[in-house]
Amino acid sequence: MSTLNDSIEAGGATPPATVKVWDPFVRVFHWSLATLFLVAYLTADEIEKVHIAAGYTIAALVALRIVWGFVGPAHARFSNFVHSPRATLSYLRDVALLRAPRYIGHNPAGGAMIVGLLVTLTGTCITGYMMTTEAYWGAKTVEEIHEVLANLTVGLVIFHVLGVLVASFEHRENLVKAMITGRKRRR
């Protein structure tokens, strides 16, 4: 089949032009982090070695993502998607009114979510590490902070998934597919 025929769908219409948005690192990071967090959360009190290994891997991924937020491609950079609180709240109001503008990269709410998740995951990893040290071994306060941060992360993940579903509906775009393929509709 020729390249021309590959681009034609049923009915003879060509699909909308797409643009590459999410680079391979961002996509692998996203799905690896989601999987590892689920593993860490489910093994918290049950399988300590798996929990700790998942936690250290999450810490490494978060550190790499923070670096990538400064040196990665345009849509991976914090400067591309971190907006002021005012802009983020204005965007959320527009979402509620079903008139939010579409973004090729992360929208302001998505940018705020990334920052929030990176902060809670960093805190969870730091407190998790602290609990393995002599100074904080058995420290109930550190353990409680660790659990609160992990549960706060779960809450953020739920809001993240809901936000993806709302944005996908509002803009008629499969954002889950975009995070797998790395491509989004141009317009």
Image (cartoon, rainbow, N blue to C red):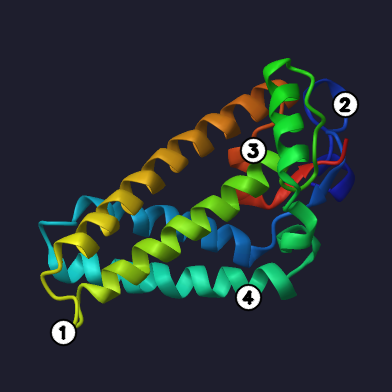
Q: CA distance from mark 4 to mark 1?
A: 30 Å
Q: Secondary structure at mark 3?
A: helix
**Residue 184 visible:** yes
Amino acid carrying label 1: it is: Glu
Q: Tell me if mark 1 has few (under 14), some (14-19) or many (20+) residues whose alpha carbon lies within 10 angstroms of its own.
A: few
Judging by the rendered image, the residue that carries numbered circle 3 is 175
Residue 3 location (% of width, % of height): 85, 49
Residue 108 location (% of width, % of height): 72, 42
Quadrant of residue 134 within the rendered picture? bottom left
Is label 1 or label 3 in front?
A: 1
Q: CA distance from mark 2 to mark 1?
A: 66 Å
Amino acid carrying label 2: it is: Ala
Residue 93 location (% of width, % of height): 71, 23
Judging by the rendered image, the residue that carries numbered circle 4 is 67
Residue that appears at 37% across and 72% down? 57
Is label 2 or label 3 in front?
A: 3
Residue 54 location (% of width, % of height): 30, 67
Q: CA distance from mark 4 to mark 2?
A: 42 Å
Amino acid carrying label 3: it is: Leu
Judging by the rendered image, the residue that carries numbered circle 2 is 13
Which of pointers 2 and 1 lies earlier in the amino acid sequence?
2
Q: CA distance from mark 1 to mark 3?
A: 44 Å
Q: Is residue 99 above or below residue 79?
A: above
Q: Secondary structure at mark 4?
A: helix
Q: Tell me if mark 3 has few (under 14), some (14-19) or many (20+) residues whose alpha carbon lies within 10 angstroms of its own.
A: some
Q: CA distance from mark 3 to mark 4?
A: 24 Å
Label number found at residue 134: 1
